[in-house]
Amino acid sequence: GIQVEQSPPDLILQEGANSTLRCNFSDSVNNLQWFHQNPWGQLINLFYIPSGTKQNGRLSATTVATERYSLLYISSSQTTDSGVYFCAATNTGTASKLTFGTGTRLQVTL
Amino acid sequence: NAGVTQTPKFQVLKTGQSMTLQCAQDMNHEYMSWYRQDPGMGLRLIHYSVGAGITDQGEVPNGYNVSRSTTEDFPLRLLSAAPSQTSVYFCASSSLGRGGYSNQPQHFGDGTRLSIL
């Protein structure tokens, strides 16, 4: 099946800083999603982005499918951005099996 | 609109006991799935369903059963609980995209924290 790798595994930022999270995947994808798991354990869907660029407030994401990576940008970080960010993907061969990366744990400090 | 509802939120079992984790969604989604989340390992797919009467195995199906008799409900059964099944379990749902694939945004429940002694 598809392999999904995320970097960095951990990230500490001061409030107001910007950051870029990376997701590499091993095969062509027809589904790439970014999630935020908050400190209470809830998983929130941030972006559905198998290709191209999307923006939602201070967050944006870009997927370059031909080069097999996706980036999540967080600008002007806030303490509420803390948590774990996951990317997940399916490829055309296993199109109903979503594979998650191991996540990037983000801590935003005052 | 409740979205995806999981019950119970917490459960403690003894080794060998059986139980059913409940998952219900009110968005008329065809696709439903179960994941387990263990520390440092992200989420791993247990079983999934693309519609009533259709289920299939994910990455870690052993020790778990599912059935899908209605569009709304997708229960997960532990047949004989083992300490290795201590985990947080998440249910998710989505609509199906072109070709009948689950390539649509996934909506997650709040999880069930299960401990097996």
Image (cartoon, coloured by chain):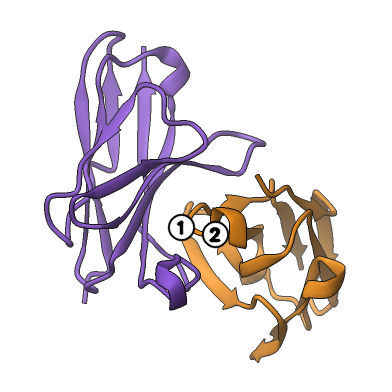
B67 shown above or below A78: above
The residue lying toward the viewer, choosing from B46 and A91, is A91
B75 shown above or below B73: above
Q: Quarter holding the C terminus of chain A?
A: bottom right
Q: Is residue B29 visible?
A: yes
- Identify by letter the chain in purple: B
The residue lying toward the viewer, choosing from A32 and A91, is A91
- Identify by letter the chain in orange: A
Q: Mark 2 lies on which chain?
A: A
What residue is at 78 percent from the left and 83 percent from the top? A76
Q: Residues within 10 Å of mark 2 (few under 14, many from 20)?
A: some
Mark 1 and mark 2 in contact? Answer it, CB < 8 Å.
Answer: yes
What residue is at 21 percent from the left and 72 percent from the top? B28
What residue is at 28 percent from the left and 66 percent from the top? B30
The total number of labels drawn is: 2
Amino acid on which disc 1 is placed: Gln
Mark 1 lies on a secondary structure that is: loop
- Name the disc covering residue A38, or none: 2
The residue lying toward the viewer, choosing from B19 and B110, is B19
What residue is at 38 percent from the left and 13 percent from the top? B82
On the image, which quarter does residue A98 sit in? bottom right
Mark 1, residue position: A42
Work out how far the residue at label 1 is from the one at label 2, CA to CA, in angstroms. 6 Å
B90 with respect to A86 (left or right): left
Q: Position of residue B2 (x, y in %)?
A: 22, 70
